Each structure stands twice: as structure tokens, then as C-alpha cells.
Amino acid sequence: MTAPTPVQSTATKPQPSAREVDAFCMQYAPRAPGHSAVRDLYRLLCDVPEGGLEQRLEWVERWVQWLRERIPAHGLVDALEPEVSPSDSRLALLVRVLEGEPAMRAAVTRLVAAVCEGCRGLTLFAQVGLPAGQGFFAEASDRFARTLLPTVPEPGKLSELLLRLCPHPDDARWLAGLSPTRLAQLAALVGEPKPPEPAPAARVRADLMDALLLLAVQLAALGMAEDVRDRSPETAFRASPFLRLRMLCDSVLARDGAPDTLRDLATCVADCRQVVASVSRHLEDRGVSVDLVYRLERIRRGLQRMEAIARVLGAPRGEARWREAMALVSNLLRRAHADRSVMELARRNVRMLARKIVERAGHSGEHYITSTREGFHAMVHSAAGGGLVTAVAVANKTFLSGLLLAPFFSFMAVGLNYAAAFVLIQLLGFTLATKQPSVTAATLAGAVGEGARGERLASLVELIPRITRSQLAAFAGNLGVVAPTAVAFALGYQALTGHTFMSPAKAQATVASLHPWKSGTLLYAAMTGVMLWMSSVAGGWLENFVVYRRLPEALAHHPLLRRLLGVDRARRLADGFQHAASGLGANVALGFLLALGPVVGRFFGLVLDVRHVTFVLGALALAGTSLGPDAVLQPAFLWALGGAALTGFINFGVSFSLALGVAARARDVPSREALPFLRAVLTHLVREPRSFFLPPKELENDVLRVSAPPAS
């Protein structure tokens, strides 16, 4: 918190003389008569305005600046009193002065009454620090607009006064640290104006009652929404506690916060929390919506605000009430500052969606991890099929790149080529090695986040070798087939047509573009790793969308499908669609992402490209066939082979690291467990290096055992 500016009077009243100031200091601070806090307070109390809300608010702002001043307060309190903070010592000084100066006390009392009467607290208690929109995207756009646009001054609201008095986030801690005892003493002196002026406490209490009623209406509407009711089936409509909120708040209002009405309200709030917990549990099984998670968070925080207000209303007058009041005000001030950030909103509300996406990707990742020799060999064979399909896609991409198409149609053609190849790999049950890192990382994070610490380390030490050898098997199958297939295709094309598939210039340009440091290969490989991770996120999102919208059930009961296919086949189609949704989403997204990179680069005048290791090796094989055997042994081609190897390493490292980091954060995996985890894995590598590269000689019984790798 920055140091406040010195207190300066802006009033037109005559300034007190130096003799009057000295006499005041000697009377109320004899142990520190020269302290600046005493002199500033005397000038401040002599300058209390008698008219105009804005002038009074300016005086309150100057008083808070005086109270927040960090100049050491030694000598302002009695020697027998324990050590207190500067703010509390200044509060004690103010109480002593108002007790001994009736005229000053009367002026401050009138000012407090006028400020409370002229400012309304409904917005402060019912809206400040709480999300305002009815959905995540509405709230995000509202926050973004408030960040860019200037705010309209509204001096008639206590909400604006609070932010005006406490403009820094650290002020919430300062408010919470003020002594409730001192505040209660001060309120007893200035909180009871002479009739007919209304008492400030009554005005604030009425605003608190109104805030309770407004919150009850808002939360009842949110809690009775259809998607909330559908996900809390154990609660009957008429028995919903959200229906009782409004009636109980009416009772609190009618009986002026009687203790029994507040107890009934607390019970109802607890019941509403149980409904929210039930909805959250069903979200774990039936998919997540960002808007629904946002509204659940809005309900939780609204219920917390209602409880805080009820505690203030139910606390006895004096120190206890001020303790609850300052806890409420400091909390809503903290929320008010935190809730100005769009990123904070996203972090708080997208976490559950991120976790569900990661979990669904993790379920797919389990199928890419082999635990037996049979599974290892099946992975190699499956990846070989993926390499065969990829070689055809490389040839198609080379052909499409030579066509003179507009950028949009070129993007669509290349994207459809990639996507069709990836989807075909999935439908045929083949494997693509670069798809594994992002999904196996999610499985790894799931193993990190489950079980006791010792159990987690033991399971991880066994899981890591399985992941590495399964990944190596997939790479061996993909790369061992794509290059020979591309060479065979190029030789066949040359035999049929009489000329090479690639022109010499195109082949030389392909080789030159794969040099490790004379081209952007390493950067493009990292960018492709990001795309591989993004495609897994897209696949998890699509599966979550399918589950949340209950599309498989809709397909299984669709009248047209039942009439055309029959009931059993329609049900099997729906089950197959749910099983394949994640793979379809990931494959289509990856295909168009790979095609989009160069297009975006040309749009901004940048040279951007993608480097997918399987496609790189296929393109290099086509180029080598066109250039001839002698060119393959030249340093430029050998450097290009090195670039292809680095491309595979970077593809794997970037996508795996991103997926593991996001999955660990989504599951709240503590970072302190990283070092013991790495130490245990390295120890296992030293003791059993073979397990990281080759399958076991004997069968292992494990939950991750698979007979064959499924579709990519």
C-alpha cells in the first residue's frame, strides 16, 4: 500500500492559531505534544463541513487518510496500554478528543448521520464483490468493458465511497486489523444524533435487510434454473430450499432480525449448499458447462454473503457487532478488488472444465500404454498402419501444395487432407505416435493426483517405463513404415510417368527447409507440439460437450435413426459415437491446426510452417527419391535427417510438457512432489534401464494392461 498524502484542509473555515493547536496538543497528548497526528486531527475537527454531501465525503476521505498514516504513534496512548498499531492509537486519540469536546462531537455526529442518510448501502452489501452477470461470458465481457471505459461517479452509494476510501487491495487487510473495541467506542459517541435526524445504525441496518432480500431473490432464481434442477434430482421441486429463501428473508425483515428467524435462515442456507454440492457431483459424471460452473460459484458466494450479513444482524451491539461488520466490509472490499480481473474469473471458473477435459484425455491415454510383450508388439503393428496412412497423406499434401489455389481453398484442401488421414487412422484402429504424449501425460497426472504419497510414487515408478517404451514402439512403427512407403510411392510414380514426383527444385527446397539451425525447423516443431496439445484439448472438450448435452441418448432415441437402423443398431451407433467423440474432435482439430499455421503466417507477413515428425520424414523420403542416391549421402540431406530427429523430440517434449503441466494444475497436484518423483524415476532408470525401452519378459498384472492399442 502506498503511503497516503499528507492531510490538507480544503475548507473555508478560519484556521486555528498556533496557540490553540499547542493547547489542544498539551491537553490530549501530553506525552507527545508535537506529534503531527495530534495537530492534523485538531485541524481536521475544526474543519467539519456543515452542508453538501460531496464536501462531507471529501472530509471522510481526509479522515481515513489521517487514520491510515503510518507515522509511528508512540506517545498517543497511555503508558499503561499495551502496544497498539498506529491506526488504533489514532482511533484512541479521536475517542478521547470527542469525549472531551462536545462541540466537535456534535459536528462529527451530524456529518456521520448526513453521510449515512445520503448514501445507500444496498449495492455495497448485495452486489460489490459478487459476480454481476447471469453467465460466465456476460460477466467476462462486463469486466472487460469496465476495465476500458471510465466509471460514472455516484456519490450517493456507499459502494463507491468504500472504493474511494480504500482504493488499494491491501486496504482490506488494514480494515480487518482495526480494533472493534475502538470502533464501538467511536460509534457510541457519534452514532446517536439528536432527533429528528435518523440514527446511522438504523439506516445501515435497513440496507442490510434489503440486501438479504435482494440476494434471496437472485439466488432463488439461479438455484431454480432448469439445468440446476436437472442435476439435483434427489431434491423435489417443492422441497427446494431455494424456494424458502425468499419467505425466510421476508420473516427476518418483518421481525427486524429476531434470533429465531436468523437461525431458520442459516439452516436454509446450509440446505442450499447441499443442493449446490449435489449439482457439482453430477457435473463430475455428466459433463461440465462453464456457464453452469459460474452460476454455482455465484450461488456459493451469495450464500456466504447472506451468512455474513446475518451474523452482523444477529450480533449484540457494541464490540461483537463491529467485529462482524468489519469482517464483512473487509471481505467484500477484497472481493471487489479481485473481481475486476478477467483472468481471475477465468482461472476460478474454467478449472473444473479443464479438469474434466484432462480426465477424458487421460481415459484415452490409458489405451496408449502397454504393459505386456503382446501389447508392445501390437502397438508397433498398429503404428505401422498409421505410418502407411501418413505416407499417403504426405504425397497428397505435396500434390496439393503445388496447386495454384486461393489461400482459403488451399487451407481447406490441406486441412481436409490431414484430418481425413487422422480420422482414417482412428477408424482403422491404427496409432499415430505424436498423438500419444498429450493424452499419456493426462494419465500420468491422474496417477500423481490419486492415492497416498507413497502409493503414488510406487505407481509412477511403474507407469513411466510403460509410457516411454509404448511411445518408442509407436515411433518405431510410424517412422519405420512411412519412409519406405513414401520411397515406394515415389519410385512407382516415376516408373509410371517417367518423371520424379517432386521437381528437383522442390526437393532441394524441402531438404533445405529441414536443416536444424539454418531454417526455422526447431521453432516450427515446438509450434507443432503446441498444436498437438491443443488438439487433445479439443478432443476432451468435444467429449465433454457430447456428455453434457446427452447427445448419445438423443441419437439412441431419435425416431428417424430407429426407423432406419432399428433400436439396437441406433443404440450401438450412439455408444460408438460417444466412444469415438474425443478421437474425432482431436483428429479433425489437429488436421486443420496444421493447415492453419502457414495461412496465419502469410496473413501477418510471417514465415510460419509446421513440423510434424511423421510428415517430415515422409516428405524427406519423397525428396531423397527425387534427388537420387548420391544426394542422400550429401551433408545437407544428413543435416535434414538430424532435423527430423530433433523434430520428433521437440514434438514429444512440448506436447507432453504442456499436457502434464495443465493436468497437474487442474488436479491440484502439489509442485513439491516433483523432486521426489524425478528422483524415484531416475533411480529406477539406473537399476532397470531395459524396462524403459523393451517390454517385460513375463506378463504383468496391472490395471493398465491392454491386449492391443485402440484407435488413434
Image (cartoon, rainbow, N blue to C red):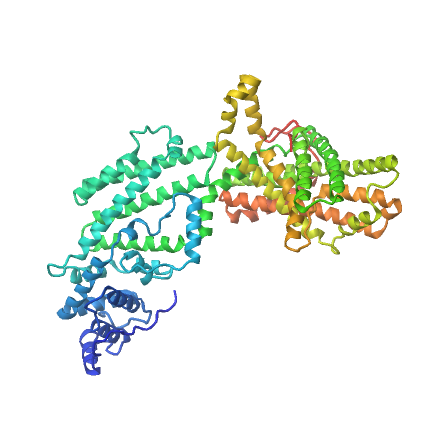
Judge whether residue 80 can be spotted in this image.
no
Q: Position of residue 259 (x, y in %)?
A: 19, 42
Of residues 514 and 414, the one drawn nearer to the viewer in this rendering: 414
Identify the image quadrant of residue 26.
Answer: bottom left
Q: Position of residue 671 (x, y in %)?
A: 52, 49
Q: Position of residue 131 (x, y in %)?
A: 37, 48
Judge whether residue 160 can be spotted in this image.
yes
All told, the count of numbered labels is 0
Tell me the quarter of the image containing the C terminus. Answer: top right
Tell me the quarter of the image containing the N terminus. Answer: bottom left
* x 21%, y 55%: residue: 319
Vertical side of 200 occupied by 68: above or below: below
User: Left of 449 or right of it: where is 605?
Assistant: right
* x 33%, y 60%: residue: 153
Identify the image quadrant of residue 591.
Answer: top right
Of residues 14 and 45, the one drawn nearer to the viewer in this rendering: 14
User: Left of 396 or right of it: where is 151?
Assistant: left
